[in-house]
Amino acid sequence: MDKNAAMHIIAHMRSDFPTKFGVPRQSGLAASLTSRIVFEPPFRNPDFLRGIENYSHLWIIWQFSENITAGFSPTVRPPRLGGNKRMGVFATRSPFRPNPIGLSCVRIERVDLHTDKGPVIYVSGADMTDGTPIYDIKPYLPYADAHPDARDDFTSGTPRVRLSVDFPEELRARVPESLVRPLTEVLSEDPRPAYQRDPARIYKMPFSDIEVHFTADGETLRVVDIIKGAPR
């Protein structure tokens, strides 16, 4: 292997998603979700983060670790189109790619330089499972990275629909207060696979240390049970 092409895992994301099910399909869609970037031992020197307090957002370059053995093809079926239309893989953000690399923009909530695991960056809006390997971190630069006049004929033609979440109070009470809002945001984004739309089906989504059971019919998602102590 070309040593110049070697990539190093510098950190891992610690999030409330033990599995892929429920992870937002893009970063920033569930803005109140908080996660932690925990660095690997060789990168725990606070000097690596010197000056990071000058930025509000970061680009995270990471590995689609759940899809490494899934393979890829020239075309994919994006969930945004209901999974019924094929698009070229390089014209989508599908995780099934020749190189399993993801790119996400997250907001910095705070930085703790001195923990028992070295520096930790607390971020919001991440779209990664717990333990996702991170290859690199770069600051988001508004003057270079924001393009208000950018064209997007693909998603602009398919309106984004957020589901109405029916979350009974007695079930909310089983969820830690700090997780109620981010969980509701995740559910409103419709975590079901694009090809599954059975209104009678009960879906089970692990989230933090609970398991959320829900049904969905039309534009309404209903939480029907919360199981505490779900395994991570």
Image (tube, rainbow, N blue to C red):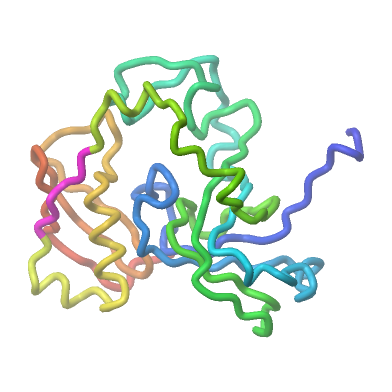
Q: Is 196 on the left-hand or right-hand side of 142?
A: left
Camera-nearest residue between 54 and 183 = 54
Q: Is 216 on the left-hand or right-hand side of 10?
A: left
Picture quadrant where residue 112 is located: bottom right
Please, is residue 45 above or below residue 185 in the view?
A: below
Total number of numbered discs in the rendering = 0
Camera-nearest residue between 172 and 213 = 172
Residue furthest to the right: 3
Camera-nearest residue between 69 and 124 = 124
Picture quadrant where residue 173 is located: bottom left
In percent of the image, x 22 and y 48: which residue is there? Answer: 203
- The image shows residue 60 at horizontal and vertical percentages of 60, 52
Q: Which residues are magenta?
A: 161-166
In percent of the image, x 24 and y 74: which residue is there? Answer: 175
Please, is residue 20 above or below residue 114 in the view?
A: above
- The image shows residue 72 at horizontal and vertical percentages of 55, 23
162 drawn magenta: yes
- The image shows residue 105 at horizontal and vertical percentages of 52, 51
Q: Quadrant of the C terminus?
A: bottom left
- The image shows residue 212 at horizontal and vertical percentages of 24, 60
In percent of the image, x 12 and y 62: which residue is there? Answer: 167
Q: Is 179 on the left-hand or right-hand side of 69?
A: left
Q: Quadrant of the N terminus?
A: top right
Please, is residue 47 above or below residue 138 in the view?
A: below
Please, is residue 150 above or below residue 24 in the view?
A: above
In percent of the image, x 64 and y 56: which residue is there? Answer: 139
